[in-house]
Amino acid sequence: MAGYPFLGRLEGVIRYHHENCDGSGYFGLSGDDLPGISRLIRLADSVELGFKLWNADYAEKARIREYVKGSAGKLFAPETAAAFLEASPRARASGSISGKSTWAPPSTSTPPPTARR
């Protein structure tokens, strides 16, 4: 596991997963002082707790993207926020994150699977 860059330093992952990237968290750690997986959990936890993911419509997804974009460098590490936004289908479709998009919708007419409850 040590070969994966974001898993190389596992100590403190749970302890620091509520730390803010700008150092304004309880322990005062910032940036690269935080384990990479803690930075990832910080973003995922905030999004999961702050938004209605189970029934997110277009407007809610846009609010999530704006929240992550606006919190980059403050709550979330800029590279973690950028990866999240790059993974967003709307961002990939519009090319708004990386400039030129290579993403395209699936070419099948099969409806998407329904979410498990």
Image (tube, rainbow, N blue to C red):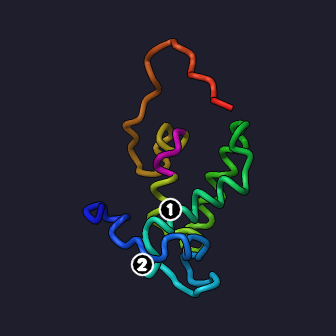
For the N terminus, give its image quadrant.
bottom left
Q: Is residue 86 left or right of residue 6?
A: right
Asked if 55 appears above or below 4 in the picture, the reply is above
Task: Please name whichever residue, 39 or 116, is drawn nearer the observer in this view of the structure.
Answer: 116
- Magenta segment range? 85-89
In the rendered image, residue 65, in percent from the top left (x then y), is placed at 61, 52
Q: Quickly name the residue at label 2.
A: 32
**Eyeballing the image, is 20 above or below 65?**
below
Q: Residue at x 48, y 76 (%)?
A: 12
Can you name the residue that lies furthest to the top here?
109
Residue 54 lies, in percent from the top left, at 70, 39
The residue depicted at 55 percent of the width and 40 percent of the height is 90
Query: For residue 40, which numbered disc appears in the image?
Result: 1
Q: Which quarter of the rendered picture does the C terminus lie within?
A: top right
Return the residue nearer the eye: 84 or 10.
10
Percent of width and height locating residue 67: 66, 59
Drawn side of residue 78 relative to residue 61, left or right: left
Amino acid type shown at disc 2? Asp
**Disc 2 element:** helix
Q: Looking at the picture, how far across and down is residue 103, in whole percent?
A: 41, 35
Q: What amino acid type is highlighted by mark number 1? A: Leu
Give the Cα distance between marks 2 and 1.
12 Å
Residue drawn at point x = 66 percent, y = 46 percent: 62
Residue 76 in which image quadrant:
bottom right
The secondary structure type at the circle numbered 1 is helix
Badge 2 or badge 1: first in the primary sequence: 2
